[in-house]
Image (cartoon, coloured by chain):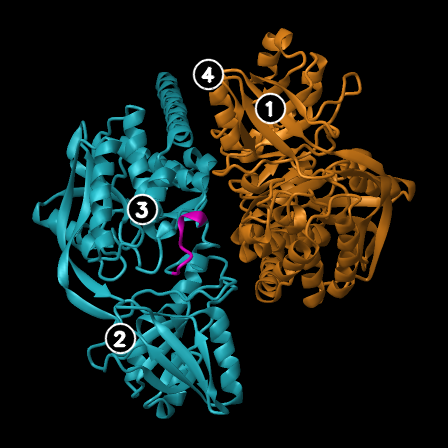
Chain colours: A cyan, B orange
Amino acid sequence: MLSFIRFMVLFLLVVIQSAWAQTTDSVFIKNLADEILLHARAYEQLTYLTKQIGPRLAGSAGMVKAEQWGLKEMQKAGADKAWGQECLVPHWVRGGVDKATALFASNDKKGIPLDVVALGNSIGTGSTPLRAEVVEVKSFEDLEIKKERVKGKIVFYNYPFNPTYVRTFQAYGDANKYRGQGPSQAAKYGAVGTIVRSMSHGTNNHPHTGATRYDSLYNKIPAVAIGLEDADQLSRWLTKESVQVQIKTNGHFLPDTIGHNVIGELTGTEFPDEIITVGGHLDSWDNCEGAHDDGAGCVQTLEILRAFKAIGYRPRHTIRFVLFANEENGLRGGSKYAEEAKQKNEKHIFALESDAGGFTPRGFGFTISDAQYQKVLGWQSLIAPYGCSEFSRGGGGADIGPLNRTFNTPVAGLQPDSQRYFDYHHARNDVLEAVNKRELELGAINMAALLYLVDRYGLGQ
Amino acid sequence: MLSFIRFMVLFLLVVIQSAWAQTTDSVFIKNLADEILLHARAYEQLTYLTKQIGPRLAGSAGMVKAEQWGLKEMQKAGADKAWGQECLVPHWVRGGVDKATALFASNDKKGIPLDVVALGNSIGTGSTPLRAEVVEVKSFEDLEIKKERVKGKIVFYNYPFNPTYVRTFQAYGDANKYRGQGPSQAAKYGAVGTIVRSMSHGTNNHPHTGATRYDSLYNKIPAVAIGLEDADQLSRWLTKESVQVQIKTNGHFLPDTIGHNVIGELTGTEFPDEIITVGGHLDSWDNCEGAHDDGAGCVQTLEILRAFKAIGYRPRHTIRFVLFANEENGLRGGSKYAEEAKQKNEKHIFALESDAGGFTPRGFGFTISDAQYQKVLGWQSLIAPYGCSEFSRGGGGADIGPLNRTFNTPVAGLQPDSQRYFDYHHARNDVLEAVNKRELELGAINMAALLYLVDRYGLGQ
């Protein structure tokens, strides 16, 4: 009986302690949320980054300006220390305005301009435009069927961005191989150019760029993305007659140059050598303001730092706030960050990334152990009131991938609502005006809450 | 032992049947979703409604055009029958462009225009503008303190739209009493006009209208809403000096006129006399396209009808698809619908409304019994993959409120993400371009799934 009473007393103590902790945590998170909703600088910072600095592809003048700005903002937000971590970055330039014109067998006077953008990392056509007949393929399988017909031609990958995937990243995962591998797969059969249907289900005709990767086994051929309306139109023309397209692009690489990860740190009070990382990437494509991709992730990162300082939170572990370099066409920043961590034998206990747009937050995707996942599920009810009610396995982000692969560091990615993302992704309309101030702030709140809980309770093994 | 075996067999049968039903339902809902994501007409219909018809306040020419269009679309979408249900609607007109100018004691030459919009149902200033000194109050409590000072003055309600409420409808519920009751409360103490801070936390200066309600005990005084930037500016001026504002508005009522609820019906195969209602409201304010409020709800309603027909679904119960008249400034359509239902002794088993914008769906709010709520919670996992993962108590919609009050009909409201809603609500920027095609379609999918489940299994008592 005594042991039963002792058990019950202990049990009640645990219950009370746990309830007390939950209350304390929910009060803390509410304070953090109020601080951000009332005083956030994220939207103002994004306004500067997009409107005053603008595009900031690796190697560009915009990159340099953005890094200088980022470092100042880290200091202003209250980092204990802030620095730039040097890394070599590729320096691809578009070299001019990309152009394409459709020309018709039935009427050699008629030329209809197409809205295209060269794929990132692609080679240009040189001073003489490329002109060749177009062969449309619906998929790589279709290319195999038509492989005898593509020599000397332009292959037009008209693979649809599947609207029936409710989560749009699934459609992207499904379609983006045509952007990445399409040009080399076409060159393998002697094609001289590639046109890729944009990875989007937007209701406009903006073409969407993004990195392509040439396979060194085959010729490098020029490659452009085409807007959806033009893609549909080109496809319709091709059912009726032979169509040539004349393409003029100027992409080329300059020598690698110096870029930086911009890092701010709050040094841990109890475990200064155990590091939590949070970040987004500072580079953007050259054809847009990169407001959602990934200006949003950068200013959310800065905002979390500012808010922690503003409410006087001193983390137990060291938290690093990182604006990564060159995510878009090289991942040199994320790679460098993990590499130096390995050289210095750092201990990285968690990393969190925001690189899916500044939209209303819905959840987190976790690449962590079963036991760690059980632990974070216990925090779900604390975070859900701010939007992230959907926790799932899998996820993280490109920039923290190297950390995960190097140390098996547990990682997570913010998952904002994805419906609008591919309307803007890598296209000229990824501008400040597409970002909603509150949605951006709520993303920061949900991330800050998760970071706080990891810092306070750890993730375990 | 035998009875145990019998129990186990029965138990297993129930489990298998239930699993089978869940599978059948999830397959059905997936088909419905694919049909809508691939073939929806909702966005195209919204484009027509907003761009070709435009504003459609009760009594206006836009209302008549919208009703004719709605009836045709009901027929096109495949209603078994479609009709207009006549009702008397109020006919308030703005009567011209609303104007306001700030005038300063320190400089009688300087007049600074303010961006204002007259509140719906408000009286105009007449041909002579109203000019009076402004007294700012922060709340009704503040008005009580300052009541001796407001006689002959314009009361400026500068009550903030609280950004710390994560769900923005909470901020609206908190603030909209100043729009509804503010003018009469000010008139009670002899004020001659009212300026109300817009109910929004947008990042622009658009003023937001909406209905005001005069209390018959007091004088009716002109009332305008002011944009957020102008409200902040006016408040700053008032800390420094006396400011007069000159207001010119022209609002007035014409005699009541005839409007219609537009109704389409799929007649139930098993229970034709048991009615499920789904709808949105066809009217909008006169200063905008009413794309989110509530064009979205209307085209979602039409889309659900179209999709049910397209996949060959014959409902067991009668489903009525309703585009309600005059939600904004009278609720005559919703009231008429319930009234006629009562006269005809109809049996209404469920009603669902979409009137919170065409944004990405997050949940449903239910005003239903405990037992019914337990039942719908059992369907949550079937609907959540399409966005509505958050089920909660409370909610419905203005137009189905009378049905709920008359028959105690269980009601529910679609709850899209609310972060952007009050950026557009009743303001000139509530236009098609603020609506995302997929978000709109997903709203229809979630509603259609819920209607299907209610139709198939009923809600019970």
Identify the chain of the residue marked 2, using the numbered disc in the image: A
- CA gap between label 4 and label 1 equals 15 Å
**Marks 2 and 3 share the same chain:** yes
- CA gap between label 3 and label 4 equals 34 Å
Is residue A20 placed above or below B57 in the rendered structure?
A: above
- CA gap between label 4 and label 2 equals 62 Å
Mark 4 lies on residue: B240
Residue B400 circle label = none
Identify the chain of the residue marked 3, using the numbered disc in the image: A
Disc 4 packing (10 Å; few <14; some 14–19; many ≥20)? few
Q: Identify residue type, mark 4.
A: Lys
Is residue A162 placed above or below B210 in the rendered structure?
A: below
**Part of the protein shown in magenta:** A427-433
Relative image position of residue A3 (x, y in whole percent): 35, 19
Per the image, label 4 sits on a secondary structure element best described as helix
Q: Tell me if residue A457 can be seen.
A: no
Mark 1 lies on residue: B245
Do residues under tags 2 and 3 come within 8 Å of each other at their CB atoms?
no
Q: Nearer the viewer, mark 1 or mark 3?
A: 1
Q: Is residue B329 magenta?
A: no
Q: Nearer the viewer, mark 2 or mark 1?
A: 1
Residue A124 circle label = 2
Relative image position of residue B73 (x, y in whole percent): 74, 61
Residue A52 circle label = 3
Q: Identify residue type, mark 3.
A: Gln
Per the image, label 1 sits on a secondary structure element best described as strand
Per the image, label 3 sits on a secondary structure element best described as helix
